Amino acid sequence: MKDRKKSRLLVPWNRFFWFILVIVSVSGFTFSTFRLFFTETFHPRLVSWRNQEIRSTSGETPAISVRETVTLPDQALIFLKYPPSTPLLTKDDIDCSYFLSNSSEPQQKLPPLFVDDGEHLDRQIVRCPLHPRGFTISVAVKSNCYLPVGPTFRWDSLVYEAIIDRDNTTIVFVKGLNLRPGRASETSRFECVYGWDFTKPKSLIRSEVLSVAQEIVRCRTPLSILSETQRSNNHSMKVSVRVKRKGILPTVARPGNLMEPGPPARKQHQICVCTMLRNQAKFFQEWVMYHTRIGVQRWFIYDNNSDDNINDLIGSLVDANCNITRHVWPWIKTQESGFAHCALRARDSCEWIGFIDVDEFLHLPSGLSLNDVVENQARHSKVGELRVKCHNFGPSGHKRVPVKGVMVGYTCRMTTPERHKSIVRPEALDSTLINVVHHFHLKDGFKYANVNRSVMVINHYKYQVWEVFKEKFYRRAATYVSDWQEKENVMSKDRAPGLGTKPVEPPNWSTRFCQVVDIGLRDRVLEMFSDSKTRMLPWQKEQYEQEDTVLVEKRKKRRRKKVARVAM
């Protein structure tokens, strides 16, 4: 019986030979594969990216590829594409590699500025220092293996985002059309084009443009494209815009179905907030905690290339039951388009959405909740937008960042309010999605309502201590607002009066922009948030904990040095 069992387990040599031959012929094994079977011992092991080989010079297709590169004025965005279930690289795993033309070896390697994972498990953005003129850029895994360079595009002439709306139209976000702000343009000059390979124009599918305004084009989506986007998850099909007599714009935009097929019976949140930010982690916790307390239920954060670990802070707030979503939005000078994109994303879950910056705080002098104020102001069913006036606050005598935060620290402002910000009903927005940051265009039949300042006003802590304020010189987010270092529109209300184009602190900065002492929001914040024993505020406590950690580490370091001296 035992001999019979053994005979069943034995395989004749000639059968084994033919079995191996079939495998080689079908799958293209190399002679190294035979060595695996016959001469080498197989040891299973865990693989990390530090020792995994991705060789572009071997003729094999890498597991990860550079989908495309977009150059900004101060950095390069490298978009990586991952096969399904492939672990994402970390910042410590990779370098930015710089190649001379016609060279297969990198001339220089630098660490990435940041690596953004975003919401997708198969895509990643590596932000690299800008390459010198004459160099191309790619990504190298730290095992000295590098990925082939992908196609490279400029940021200011590019189709950069696209989504398919619930009415099956494609909304395309475009840089380089140079259209006038605040108005719709003639559609006959434009055409939408879809395809997988834009180097073959005859294979592209063309489509009618339904509306075009500012940087947003709405297209009629061909049925074949709708079928493809619903069936496929590989996100390889792209969309662009053809400008008559100019040609097709470069594109990195792959339309996705973000929208539900129809409006929900009931929305999950009454009031949401959307913002676009860059390096605002220092004040973000205070901003979220305060607005959550007064009634904001949902947050959409469009991160415009932050490198201050805002993602970690958002994670801690999510752990504290704040409903926050971070959306990676690397496109510069696109605040209006970002807000339009956000309004579409929020439409199925939010009755109202406010568009305010991280230095802007809704103040309710009446003592009502935010929800009550919005309901009272919008009792008429045709009110689609609430416009809230802004008071601009100055440094209020401070030369350093106030330890209790902006709402308690800054208490002196200008007398006259300037501009407004809006809380909108997403269903009321015009199909062109025209907005000028401060308000949107509404559908016919809807109207806006101005909110009385005694009911709700925005405290805009615009002119903070110089250390904070000078960051505004880096770049303005809005499309149609000149950067402050440019000698254009120097009298714009967006700028500080008389400041010029250089980030040089003027004399008496700490006492400027102070005409009226306003402690209304300060007193309310102290009443709402102060700890009954320590009188500290929640965000202040967090700040002190971080400072205490730094001090403890410094003391430990001094102690180690002292011990080392004694030992000598």
Image (cartoon, rainbow, N blue to C red):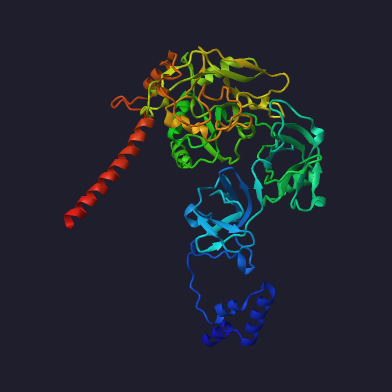
Q: Please state which of residues 66 and 152 is positioned toward the viewer in this rendering.
A: 152
Residue sitting at x 25%, y 44%? 555
Q: Please state which of residues 37 and 451 is positioned toward the viewer in this rendering.
A: 451
The image shows residue 317, relative to residue 64, as above or below, that is above
Q: Quadrant of residue 213?
A: top right
Residue 296 place in picture, x, y as percent: 51, 27
The image shows residue 558, relative to residue 509, as above or below, that is below
From where the camera sits, is residue 346 visible?
A: no
Residue 182 place in picture, x, y as percent: 69, 25
Q: Please state which of residues 309 and 479 is positioned toward the viewer in this rendering.
A: 479
In the rendered view of the protein, which quadrant contains the C terminus? bottom left
Total labels: the figure holds: 0
Q: Quadrant of residue 316?
A: top left
Q: Please state which of residues 424 and 155 is positioned toward the viewer in this rendering.
A: 155
Q: Is residue 347 left or right of residue 42?
A: right
Residue sitting at x 20%, y 50%? 562
Residue 16 place in picture, x, y as percent: 62, 83
From where the camera sits, is residue 2 visible?
A: yes
Q: Quadrant of residue 338?
A: top right
Residue 552 place in picture, x, y as percent: 28, 43
